[in-house]
């Protein structure tokens, strides 16, 4: 296939034939079925890194497997990060290095312990049943993509856990690509960096603790959804923490004395526009999300997530809360409201758009694999958002998992192969870009 960029004609000679496709499918599938059985759920209440010791079990396995594949500079650090390096093919030493990243943990939203994957062969379009939950059904109403996957093999859990395709599919696909580079010497690539990181699901910027010397300036996370997906834009994200300090009195003698923080907090939060909540928004619409509220008549502590793709819209929401604070302190003399804001992550688009080639080559790699690129926005965050803000430009490529963070999570086996193909094509496309 011939691709164009900045009026330059670049010929790509690479051909992934059926032998390589079969290798990728079998290797990625075997790894995926093993990896999902390893319990790596992260813990929101933990202050350690990684948040759960179980993540080290998968990290240890990946370190050993990377070494057995003959990769260079394989290391696992004290935080659970696993790194490796693949030297460039002969003659491609001076091309742009790239990195491929995936995360070890699974979401704490649903149990990830004792995952038992099931392969539903030759999906016929009917409801998929679950062995450990007779009332649970996976239907086309749950995921319209299922209609596109009729005739393919579909992997689910047994219905009592999530599956873990987010992001063990990404790990398996990267590992299959690494194995393929070792097996097929005709596959050309420049310097390749690999990184598997802990605690992505917690959104606590753990990725910023990664060793910068082991990450190039251009990376791709393999952590997206449906086949063909490419994500280059995410939420701009803030968290507001609010403390209401009132004054408690004996209820029998409280008139004109009590300042009931619980009642006041409830009134305060009822002022948030209902139309700007997660359950009433989609696509590019932002929201307030009251994620935590607890306390007594004396004091209430709460947390609000503020999300939008437009920083100005988030600033409007921040100003709304600031003005509401002033109003309520006037309305209730003696009430003290402490309001703080934390900028959690930024919309990665404003960084990635500085180098269009990163996206152009990803689109071409997806096309070379036989898929149509699907540009999606992320109504959430990604390690790529954190890295892009730090100067390591990192779009997100599909891993194939669907309905993630749920007991209905599934992945077509073909996605494991196609994501690995995209990694191989992308690596060769970058060999045309000299340092």
Image: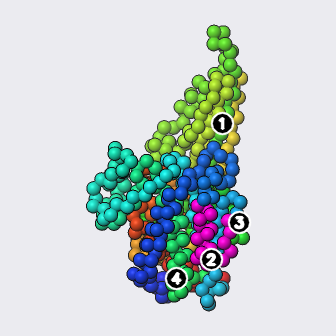
Q: Which quarter of the picture shows residue 72? A: bottom right
Q: Compared with residue 212, is residue 234 higher up or lower down, i.e. above or below?
A: above
Bounds of the magenta span?
58-76
CA gap, disc 4 and disc 3: 29 Å
Classify the position of the N terminus by image quarter: bottom left
Q: Position of residue 282 (x, y in %)?
A: 45, 50
CA gap, disc 2 and disc 1: 49 Å
287 or 66, nearer to the observer: 66
Regarding mark 1 in the picture, which secondary structure is present there? strand
The answer to which of marks 4 and 3 sits earlier in the sequence is: 4
Membership of 65 in magenta stretch: yes
CA gap, disc 2 and disc 4: 12 Å
Q: Which residue is mark 1?
A: 242
Q: Compared with residue 231, is residue 284 higher up or lower down, i.e. above or below?
A: above
Q: Position of residue 5 (x, y in %)?
A: 53, 81
- Whether pointer 4 and pointer 3 mark residues with C-beta atoms closer than 8 Å, the reply is no
Q: Which residue is mark 3?
A: 211
């Amino acid at each position: 296939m011939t691709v164009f960029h900045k009026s330059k004609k670049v010929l790509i000679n690479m051909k992934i034939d059926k032998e390589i496709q079969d290798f990728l499918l079998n290797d990625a599938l075997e790894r995926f079925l093993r990896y999902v059985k390893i319990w790596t759920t992260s813990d929101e209440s933990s202050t350690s890194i990684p948040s759960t010791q179980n993540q080290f079990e998968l990290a240890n396995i990946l370190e050993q497997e990377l070494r057995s594949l003959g990769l260079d500079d394989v290391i696992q650090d004290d935080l659970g990060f696993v790194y490796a390096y693949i030297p460039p093919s002969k003659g491609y030493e001076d091309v742009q290095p790239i990195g491929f990243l995936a995360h070890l943990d699974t979401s704490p939203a649903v149990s990830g312990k004792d995952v038992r994957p099931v392969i539903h062969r030759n999906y016929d379009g009917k409801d998929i049943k679950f062995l450990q939950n007779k009332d649970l059904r996976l239907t086309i109403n749950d995921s319209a993509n299922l209609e596109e996957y009729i005739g393919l093999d579909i992997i689910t859990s047994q219905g009592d856990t999530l599956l873990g395709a987010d992001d063990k599919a990404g790990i398996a696909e990267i590992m299959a690509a690494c194995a393929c580079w070792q097996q097929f010497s005709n596959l050309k690539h420049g310097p390749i960096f690999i990184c598997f990181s802990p605690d992505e699901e917690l959104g606590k910027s753990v990725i910023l603790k990664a060793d910068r010397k082991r990450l190039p300036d251009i990376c791709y996370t393999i952590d997206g959804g449906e086949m063909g997906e490419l994500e280059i834009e995410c939420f701009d994200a803030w968290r507001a923490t609010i403390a209401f300090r009132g004054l408690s009195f004996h209820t029998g003698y409280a008139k004109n004395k009590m300042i009931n923080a619980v009642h006041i907090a409830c009134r305060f939060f009822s002022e948030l526009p209902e139309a700007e909540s997660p359950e009433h928004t989609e696509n590019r619409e932002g929201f307030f999300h009251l994620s935590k509220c607890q306390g007594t008549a004396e004091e209430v502590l709460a947390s609000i997530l503020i999300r939008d793709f437009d920083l100005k819209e988030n600033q409007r929401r921040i100003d709304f809360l600031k003005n509401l604070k002033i109003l309520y302190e006037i309305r209730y003399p003696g009430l003290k409201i402490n309001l703080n804001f934390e900028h959690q992550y930024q919309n990665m688009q404003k960084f990635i758009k500085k180098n269009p080639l990163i996206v152009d080559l990803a689109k071409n790699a997806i096309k070379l694999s036989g898929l149509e690129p699907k540009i999606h926005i992320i109504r959430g965050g990604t390690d790529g958002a954190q890295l892009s803000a730090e100067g390591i430009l990192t779009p997100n490529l599909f891993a194939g998992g669907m309905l993630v963070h749920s007991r209905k999570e599934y992945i077509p086996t073909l996605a494991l192969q196609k994501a690995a193909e995209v990694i191989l094509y992308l690596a060769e496309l970058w060999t045309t870009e000299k340092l």
